[in-house]
Image: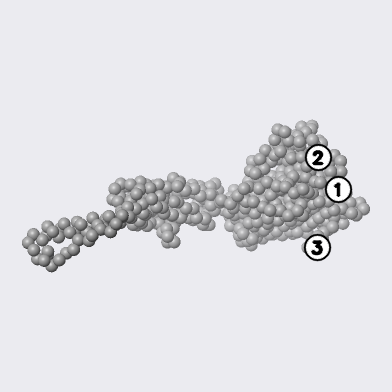
Amino acid sequence: MTGRKSEPRITPELIRGGGSWRILFGITISYLLWFSACTPEEEVFTDEAVQLQFDEDTIHFDTLFTSQGSTSEWLTIYNPNRNAVTISEIALGHRTISPYTLFLNGVSGQQFEDIRVLGNDSLLVFVEVLIDPQDQDLPFLVKDSLTFRVNGNQQDVKLIAWGQDAQFHRGWVISQDTTLRGDRPFVIQDSLWIEPDVTVKVDSGAQFFFDNNAFALVRGTLQTEGTLTAPVVFRNVRTDGLYENGFGQWDGMTFTTTSRNNILRYTHVRNAINGIVINTPDADTIPDLILANSIIENMAGYGLLAVGSDIDAYNTLIYRCILGLTYNLGNGYYRYRHCTFENGSTPRSIPIAREEEWYSLAFAEALPEQLANAEVSNQPFYAELTNSILWGNLDDELILSISSEGSTVSLNNNLLKYTDTTILGNIFNEDPLFIDPIIAQYQLDTLSPAINQGIKTSILTDLNGAKRDDQPDLGAYEY
């Protein structure tokens, strides 16, 4: 309004006078017009047929385990009209039998009525879903809709989620030889223990999802038989948003001093504090852990921390581990062939900062102070790195600390990020030119200096199953 209007006055004489009903009617209309003129347009409710607008036409949820609730997804409802509207109903299509729940202004329910939205204003509705078990091995679709009614007009937003039945375990102790099938995922709610002298074999395609602070402790033997198309997976239970690649969401896997003959083939270990910690000292050089065609990624601590153990790793990719990718400490036997170690590129949504002393790869005979009481092998320290790539954003991604007589470190035909360039037979400080490490594509680009720089070994295929030629490329992938 640009100025205050004069208010009409009602006097006793006016009321007593003849024909006063006409005057009263005119005064009433004047009042209505005056109040209407003083009400902002966006607060005046319309009864016309109007259309709301939504920031999504479908709300998608990631695959969810049955009996475990989802995180909240939200929908923004816009009123693009100049006048206010009353949404007579916001409701789930299946009402009270729906697995979905709505949250509006902090209140939960399946249906809300008479919700007012001012002109050119918006409203937030949150949605969660809790899916009942269906006794099915394969994921199943769970659908509903979110319905809005305004002045006789109806609009809908679809709700879509996939449910997955799983095997839930809390304090799971395996005390006899067992084969675990890959039919349904295993959800570990606090711990998985494999007892001494017990062998657990895991079929291809099996998936293990660990809750926050959950862990796997292998005191016996673990042998996974993943394949290229159906790897065995150990990871965190949350898969939505930033949790998909978030660091440190479970404690990881530990192999203790009584553990022997472990084999991880086509196995992915993701998003833990430490991916694999192994301390298996003995008097031989027979591998206590064979790590073949596997991937370890996104660790808040170490990807692989081996103390006084015997390790044989090949065609393995280890990347994005804040404290270090692979640390080999104390007397033991450590052999890595055709491996890719990368610790410099992270998704823009999950930046990490590394200190200068957080080397990616360590071969160190002496134990650090915090591991001084750990048992080590009776064999001399032996380390071998062949046909591999070590890259990162520090000047030195490698530390060598060997002093005892009889200890050996052999570095042959590698591409290394390392300032000591006196070690013959390696390429130093040349960008390996991965296709796109930001999205974890560590295959080699056309101009990569790692192409055809390897020596022929017994490893005849790469991590993707491609055949290696007589002049193999460095790293886990053949160009």
Secondary element under disc 2, as helix, strand or loop, is strand
Residue found at x 58% / y 52% = 242
Which amino acid type is shown beneath numbered disc 2?
A: Ile
Image quadrant holding the N terminus, namely: bottom left
Tell me where residue 17 appears, x and y as whole percent.
8, 63
Q: Are marks 3 and 1 in contact (CB under 8 Å)?
A: no
Label of residue 291 in the image: none
Is residue 26 visible in the rendered structure shown here? yes
- Viewer-proximal residue, 41 or 97? 41
Q: Residue 409 has which mark?
A: 1
**Residue, disc 3:** 369
Alpha carbon separation for disc pair 3 and 1: 22 Å
Q: What's the residue type where badge 1 is placed?
A: Val
Helix, strand or loop status at disc 3: helix
Task: Report the side of 63 relative to 348 (left or right).
Answer: left
Q: Give the mark count.
A: 3
Q: Nearer the viewer, mark 3 or mark 2?
A: 2
> Quick one: which residue is furthest to the left in this view?
18
Q: Which amino acid lies under the numbered mark 3 shown in the image of this protein?
A: Glu
User: N-terminal of the two: label 3 or label 1?
Assistant: 3
Q: Is residue 49 left or right of residue 460?
A: left
User: Mark 1 or mark 2, which is nearer the start of the sequence?
Assistant: 1
Q: Residue at x 36, y 52 (%)?
A: 119
- Depth check, front residue: 170 or 199: 170
Quadrant location, the C terminus: top right
N-terminal of the two: label 3 or label 2?
3
Residue 281 in picture, x, y percent from top left: 82, 57
User: Alpha-carbon distance for marks 3 and 2?
Assistant: 33 Å
Q: Where residue 172 sits in the image (x, y, percent)?
A: 64, 60
Q: Which mark is residue 427?
A: 2
* Callout 1 secondary element: strand
